[in-house]
Amino acid sequence: MNIHCRVYLRLLLLSLLLPSTTVAAEVHLSLPKYRIQPDELAVVVNDRDPLSVRIGEYYMQVRMLPRENLLHHSFNPHATSLPVDEFNSLREALLKQTPTHTQAYVLTWLQPYRVGCMSMTSAITFGFDKTWCSQRRCATTRHSPYYNYPGADPLKDLSLRPSISIAAENFADAKQLIDRGLLADNSLPQGTAYLLSTSDKQRNVRAIEFPRIINRMRGWIDTAILRHDSLRQRNDVLFYFTGRSQVSGLDTLKFRPGAIADHLTSAGGQLSGSRQMSAMEWLKAGASGSYGTVVEPCNHRGKFPSPSLVMEHYGSGSTLIEAYWKSVQQPGEGIFIGDPLAAPFDHVEIIHEARQTKVRTRNLKPGNYQLTHALSPIGPYTPISNLVVRYHQKELSLPRLGEGFYRLQLVGQ
């Protein structure tokens, strides 16, 4: 199986709905690659931090990752910031050690969470470079080539690997985070995206895009705009985006497995010792991913996640690390935390009917596709039909599929 070119889904077509569908047929359906696969993730641990090592080992175990993907390094776990020279040596060694097939990193420590003016996750991804930081107060920074990137092979296409941290203060919190991510997979959660327009004018700058999000997400993800400073007493939180230095009411909420939540403020990425609410509080409350800045970013929207893009990519089957990274235009000063592989909308269901085969999935980008068939996985493949997938289409009808190997290939947009 070549995971770099295709995601192969071996699915048993069950007899459903119609009495004539009494014979089940086994087919192999290949979709264009739409997400990073688990064995494309490298797990980085700090051997001087016992909690980091334990988190890394647990993540390797539950995600069934190959041992070569576990990368060991050693540095001071007590400092919030790693000196630039020491970081450069660490990253150089990391790149040499990283298996060539991997597409992303997950770090397994709480601190250090920054390198100079950069976050640890951005520094690992891009290397330390001051162009990713404000050159003067409130200046914009270098733009990420990964911003709204449509693919699933960032190393091949962009020469970078996105990074995220499973940040936790103890193993119990880390285990709960990881277990939630597993529970989220393939779950198609019924939940709501809450977009809060707050009274904090300086931090409420993302609210300008909220009405457009409502229109874009109609029929895709249930979305609500609330004019409140906090959300309370909700049990269906799938996304929560707000702008406040402190967010109250988190203890009254229930987050769906795989939920993403963040607050636009200056120091949310200061994971310990911050005067503002740390992004860590979202994970403790039950979210699977969050984001915050480690130095003063001012209120540039480009330095924070775009809720629209997070929801768009996540809702289309991307992993949490991909969806979050693709939503931040200027990520140099921001740290991503959470479970990288959580993917609640990565779901493919095939229904075998008398005259046709239906495929229910959110994982196909809009465009023109060709369906081909072969008797063996190596081909040759013969064209069967052409079809068009529309924006936010969740179901498509194919000719009735018998046994064999099928490919859906994007041929034009």
Image (cartoon, rainbow, N blue to C red):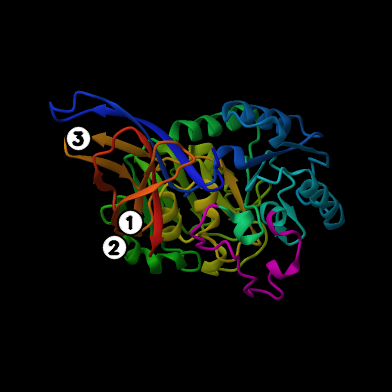
**Residue corresponding to mark 3:** 353
Farthest residue in the top direction? 22
Q: Is residue 267 visible?
A: no
Q: Label 3 vs label 1: CA separation?
A: 43 Å
Query: With 187 as the anchor, is 15 left or right in this view?
Result: left
Whole-percent x, y for residue 144 in the image: 60, 65
Confirm or deny contact between disc 2 and disc 1 (CB under 8 A). Answer: no
Label 2: few (<14), some (14–19) or many (≥20) C-alpha neighbours in 10 Å: few
Closer to viewer: mark 2 or mark 3: 3
Reply yes or no: does residue 150 show up in magenta: yes
- Look at the picture and state if 21 lies above or below 310: above
The CA span between labels 2 and 1 is: 15 Å
* Residue 221: % across, % down: 32, 50
Q: Mark 3 falls on what kind of element? A: loop
**Residue 90 relative to residue 282: left or right:** right
Between marks 2 and 3, how big is the CA–CA gap?
34 Å
Q: Say what secondary structure mark 1 lies in.
A: strand
- Residues rendered magenta in the picture: 125-152
> Label 1 sits on what residue type?
Leu
Q: Are marks 3 and 1 in contact (CB under 8 Å)?
A: no
Residue 215 disc label? 2
**Up/down of 164 relative to 366, above or below:** above
Q: Which residue is tagged 1?
A: 226
Q: Nearer the viewer, mark 2 or mark 1?
A: 2
Of 246 and 254, nearer the camera is 254
The answer to which image quadrant residue 169 occupies is top right
Q: Residue at x 65, y 31 (%)?
A: 66
